Amino acid sequence: MTDTLTKVQRDDLRTIAAMIIPESAEYKVPGADDRAIQADIVATLGRDTEPVRAALDHLAHLAGRPLAELDPAQREKVATEFRATGGVAAATLVRVILQCYYRDDRVLRSLGHELRAPFPKGHTLEQGDWSLLDPVKARGGDLRRA
């Protein structure tokens, strides 16, 4: 589904992804600009397509041209302004990049995770502090009942 984003948007996506998660030789993991990770992002955008497009367009607008055409110092300036002004679209873009990055087999392997679906074996989670949910419970009936 490569027609989901324009070529300029895909180039800017690859650029901002590399800025968020660069390649690490130390940990032997690719950056988020890796071809396979980028393909996963574009293929699985789904309901996030419009906010991601909006975020990429906002980045290009802040840059005054495609982000990929700027030098690293200019990119950093644009990224700083983007974080401050990007709103929900920026948060969506970052979430999409992170979720696709952290489901890549190479990344999971580097983190010591077994390459398998979480079920049927499941994963053991340490018990947390359930009292952190008390403010939510105290709000009462704001939530929709199942």
Image (tube, helix red, strand yellow):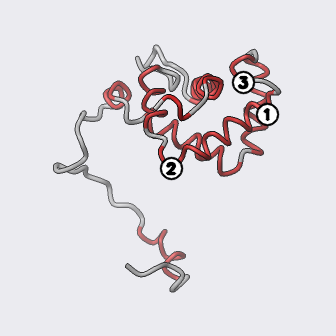
Q: Earlier in the sequence, mark 1 or mark 3?
A: 1
- Amino acid type assigned to the residue bearing label 1 in the image: His
Residue that badge 3 annotates: 67
Residue that badge 1 annotates: 61
In the displayed orientation, state which residue is furthest to the bottom: 141
Q: Earlier in the sequence, mark 2 or mark 1?
A: 2
Q: Neighbour class for label 1 at 10 Å: few (<14), some, many (≥20)?
A: some
Q: Neighbour class for label 2 at 10 Å: few (<14), some, many (≥20)?
A: few
Cα–Cα span, label 2 and label 1: 23 Å
118 up-or-down from 66: above or below: below
- Left or right of 117 in this view: 51: right
Q: Earlier in the sequence, mark 3 or mark 2?
A: 2
In the displayed orientation, state which residue is furthest to the front: 3
Dividing the image into 4 quarters, which one contains the C terminus? bottom left
Residue that badge 2 annotates: 47
Q: Nearer the viewer, residue 27 or 101?
A: 101
The residue at 58%/24% (across/down) is: 14
48 up-or-down from 35: above or below: below
Q: Neighbour class for label 3 at 10 Å: few (<14), some, many (≥20)?
A: many
Residue 20, position as x, y percentages in the image? 59, 30
